[in-house]
Image (tube, rainbow, N blue to C red):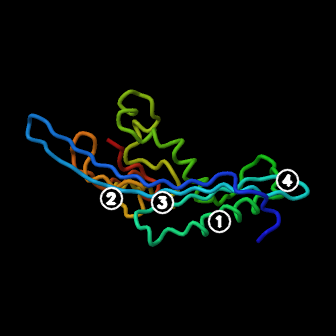
Amino acid sequence: ADARIKSVEYALTEYIEAEILIANTLGLDVAQKSNLLISLAVARAVDNASNKQGIETWQGRDLLTFQPEEIGRAAALDAVSHLGATSVDSGQMPIVLEKKAATDLFATYMPIFYADMVQKGFSQLGEKINQDIAASAVSIVDDPRCRQSFYQPAFDSEGVATRRTNLVQEGRLTGLLH
C-alpha cells in the first residue's frame, strides 16, 4: 500500500436495468431491454507539497469481469500520478491526451455535430461537409452498437434502427448526428 493514499473519498457501484418500448398507431411496435453495471472510486493522495484526487470509473454488463479492487487501485494510481504536478507556460506544443481528458474535451464539442444545431445555425460545421476540419490522423465514428459503449440501442427515440455513422474520416467531415 502507498502511504501517500490518505482516503477513498467516494466509492459507488450501481446496477441498472431498463426496458424501452415504443408503439404508435402507424404500426411501430419495438422493444429493447438492457442492463449496466457502473462503478466509480475517488482516492486522495497527499505528500509534502500537494493534495490530489484520482478517479477511476468502470462500466460493463458482466459481473465476472467486475473487479472492484482494480478500480480502487487505479484511482489511487491516478491520484499519486498528479502529486507534484505543475502548470506549464502557454504555447503551441504537441500533446497526448489521456482517455478521460479526450472524452471530456470531445463531449464539450459534440453538439457541433448535431444536424439540428447545423440547421439552426448554431454549429460552425454547416458548410463544411466533405471538407477537412481536422488533421488527417483524426477519425470520429458514432457507433451505437459498439460493444464497449455504455448503451447499445437497437433503435432511437423515434423507433428508427440505429446505425454506424462516420462523422470525420481522416480529418474530413463526412456526416452529422440525426
Q: Is residue 96 left or right of residue 174?
A: right
Numbered mark located on residue 59 in the image: 3
Label 2's element? loop
- Residue 54: x and y in percent read 69, 56
Please report the residue visible at 79 percent of the width from the left and 58 percent of the height from the top.
6
Disc 3 crowd, CA 10 A, few/some/many (<14, 14-19, 20+): some
Numbered mark located on residue 145 in the image: 2
Label 4's element? loop
First in sequence: mark 3 or mark 2?
3
Please report the residue visible at 60 percent of the width from the left and 69 percent of the height from the top.
70
User: What is the three-letter code of the residue carrying label 2?
Assistant: Arg
Numbered mark located on residue 50 in the image: 4
Badge nearest the viewer, 3 or 2: 3
Q: Is residue 178 above or below residue 154?
A: above
Q: Is residue 49 above or below residue 28?
A: below
Residue holding disc 1: 74
- Residue 22: x and y in percent read 20, 41
Disc 2 crowd, CA 10 A, few/some/many (<14, 14-19, 20+): some
User: What is the three-letter code of the residue carrying label 3?
Assistant: Gln
CB atoms at circles 3 and 1 under 8 Å apart? no
How far apart are labels 3 and 1 at the CA level?
14 Å
- The one nearer the camera, 34 or 153, is 34
